[in-house]
Image (cartoon, rainbow, N blue to C red):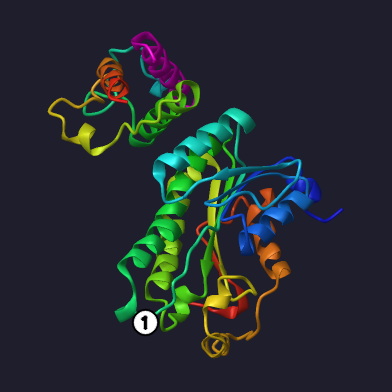
Amino acid sequence: MVTSDEVGAIILHALEALNEDSNPEDRIAVSLETPLFGADSGIDSLGFVSLITDVETALNVDHDLNISLADDFAVSRAQSPFATGETLRDYIMTLAAGQ
Amino acid sequence: MTPHQAEFSDRVVVVTGARKGIGRMIADHFLDQGARVIGMSRGEAAISHANYDHRRLDVGDNLAVRSAFAAISRTHGRVDVVINNAGVLTSVHALLMPASRAEEMVRTNFLGAFYVACEAAKLMRKGKYGRIINIGSMASVLEPVGDSIYAATKAASMTLTGVLAKEFASYGITVNTLAVSALQTDMLEQIPRDTMAAVLAELPLPRLATPDDVFNVVDFFASSASSHITAQTLFLGGAHA
């Protein structure tokens, strides 16, 4: 079972990977408090796709956790699980507990 | 050494529907050129080769496809070329088409190609390189009687090619379709001879295609030199929209 710290590390690693592909002026804070989606986020739509893909792939390949983050349940939740790294981590732990 | 032997040596190539027909031919073709080939099909492996790895799955099962590509990532670390070939055909008048067969064609021919392309692209984007080749059909434009769902899934695959080509371009991934005419395969045996003769007669080049006709285009789309070729559908035999 993947731990909350491991999931947090995966998210931070994905944010770092995003920065590596970005211009210096577009880089974002590598923190679980970083907004991932919405008006406050500095991540563009392609970057968001890369971020979610990296996180899903790491969970699948490294932890054998086959989950889809952008599913109907995520979209329908009152508070978006993609608001910050922290909310995404908590959402992943909820999904992991259900498997 | 064939012209493409150096090009494809040690490439990691995924071929769906690799047990027989066009998929088997293409898998053997890449193995002959030194590639590492991962075949996918619902049945057991039909190829025994040191560079061949087989994954038994239904490409229409998204979870199975995701698991297979996670395993490929762990084993091979990357994917360079995908041949989206898996397909099923039930050729029968629309009023007699069993719903289960119609749904199976949509799931395998269309959704399966989408699932495989997406999981492959997730691996390809890391290396900023990839070639996705969807196997289409002349049926998509000739619209033969009896092929309502089959032809529609292949037409949908062409549209899918165009959109994925745009979405994957920034990752260095090209997406193209090879629309084959008729080859002597098991699938062709399902179609009455007079029906096939009538369909072939509509082509500017009215003959069965050969494996070399297929390899010629696959090699072209799969080549690293084809980095500026994407969103294209190439019809064998001269069929056209």
Q: Residue furthest top?
A: A5
Q: Nearer the viewer, residue B144 or B63?
A: B63
Q: Secondary structure at mark 1?
A: loop
- Residue at 52% across, 76% down: B190
**Chain ID at mark 1:** B
Residue B198 at x, y percent in the picture? 53, 90
Q: Residue furthest front?
A: B44
Residue B102 on the magenta span: no
- Residue at 62% across, 30% down: B75
Q: Quadrant of residue A25?
A: top left
> In the rendered structure, which amino acid carries the disc numbered 1?
His
Residue B220 in view: no
Q: Is residue B202 left or right of residue A41?
A: right
Can you say whether B135 is above or below A30 in the image? below
- Residue at 26% across, 26% down: A82
Residue B234 in view: yes
Q: Nearer the viewer, residue B31 or B4?
A: B31
- Determine crowd level at label 1: few under 14, some 14-19, many 20+ residues with C-alpha closer than 10 A: few
Can you say whether B189 is above or below A93 in the image? below
Residue B194 at x, y percent in the picture? 54, 91
Dominant secondary structure, magenta: helix
Can you say whether B142 is above or below B171 in the image? below
- Residue at 61% across, 54% down: B18
Q: Which residue is mark 1?
A: B93
Q: Residue furthest left?
A: A78
Residue B157 at x, y percent in the picture? 44, 61
Q: Is residue B177 left or right of residue A57?
A: right
Q: Is residue B226 left or right of residue A76?
A: right
Q: Nearer the viewer, residue A37 or A97?
A: A97
* Residues drawn in magenta: A1-22
Q: Quadrant of residue B127?
A: top right
Residue B58 at x, y percent in the picture? 47, 50
